[in-house]
Image (cartoon, rainbow, N blue to C red):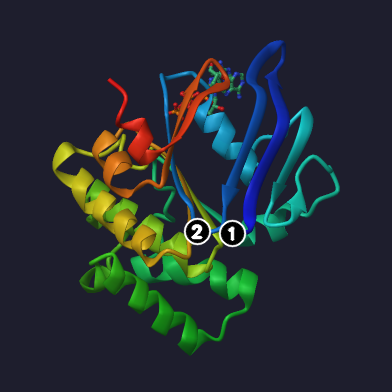
Amino acid sequence: KMAMIEFSHVDKYYGKFQALKDINLEISQGEVVVIIGPSGSGKSTLIRTINGLEEIESGRLVVNGLNLADKKTNLNELRRNVGMVFQHFNLYANKTVLENIMLAPRLVLKRDEAENKRLAMELLETVGLAEKANSYPRQLSGGQKQRVAIARSLAMKPKVLLFDEPTSALDPEMIDDVLNVMQEIAKKGDMTMVVVTHEMGFAREVADRVIFFDQGQVVEDDSTEDFFKHP
Ligand code: ADP
Ligand code: ADP
């Protein structure tokens, strides 16, 4: 399968602090990769480089054919194809759920309004929130907001979906609803997913591959089966 994300010898600094150290990783199209590791080890930094939220200092990083080491690379083009779901949903508070989902496709892709709405409603069905289309974010629980955020990312039809601790800010009883939606997306098989999470059950059941990250480095990179064989 085609490589969708390729890191080679990537370094990243915050001032003098080296957050990423010689990262070498290749992630294929359709692969579901979970990244685990201690807090402060650089997981978030790593995935934020993939959609250009963090610049890299050296090495080569190619995502969907775009070279991110080149400062001239068009980040808008990159982000059309690389969606990201954050810990804190970042929904537009003054827009309805449906509007939150329709906004970017309308503005960025100029998608036809009827088609945009049809797709948005279909995505709300997928995440189990069709009845909330006309609600505002403040009327939703954390888990519902996160599912809307996922639907919003999907509306752009990205090739890659990045998740930065998508369930860490949620009450325990809502975590499974969000993980189940992510599992459904993964099952379809066409989305490349990179997920930073502490949810080991999700890693075990959904990931193709698990990466253990520590102190800015890939310490382990295994198939899920091999990863969980370890004592
Ligand atoms: P993780 O996601 O594994 O918790 P992060 O990628 O958030 O780790 O952070 C890795 C390290 O880089 C931490 O030591 C953090 O304090 C530091 N760091 C993250 N972002 C910045 C920043 N914008 N400026 C300076 N240091 C940062
Ligand atoms: P989280 O781990 O929940 O993502 P953090 O507190 O690590 O949140 O980071 C929140 C924001 O602060 C991020 O934008 C990150 O880049 C920045 N940040 C994290 N650590 C540092 C740091 N040591 N110096 C400056 N900015 C930082």
Q: Which of 42 and 130 is in front in this view?
A: 42
**Residue bearing the label numbered 2:** 30
Q: Position of 141 compared to 78: left or right? A: left
- Coordinates of residue 176 in the picture (x, y in percent): 20, 48
Q: Does any portion of residue 141 appear in the rendered image?
A: yes
Q: Are marks 1 and 2 in contact (CB under 8 Å)?
A: yes
Q: Does the residue labelled 2 lie within 8 Å of ligand 1?
A: no
What amino acid is labelled 1 in the image? Answer: Lys
**Residue bearing the label numbered 1:** 1
- Coordinates of residue 31 in the picture (x, y in percent): 48, 53
The relative height of residue 124 versus residue 196 in the rendered view (above or below) is: below
Q: Is mark 1 on a helix, strand or loop?
A: loop
Q: Does any portion of residue 134 appear in the rendered image?
A: no
- Coordinates of residue 97 in the picture (x, y in percent): 35, 65
- Numbered tag placed on residue 60 in the rendering: none
The relative height of residue 168 versus residue 160 in the rendered view (above or below) is: above
Quadrant of the frame with the C terminus: top left
Q: Measure how far apart labels 1 and 2 are at the Cα level.
A: 8 Å
Q: Position of 118 compared to 74: left or right? A: left
Location of residue 129 by image quarter:
bottom left
**Which tag, 1 or 2, sits closer to the chain's start?**
1
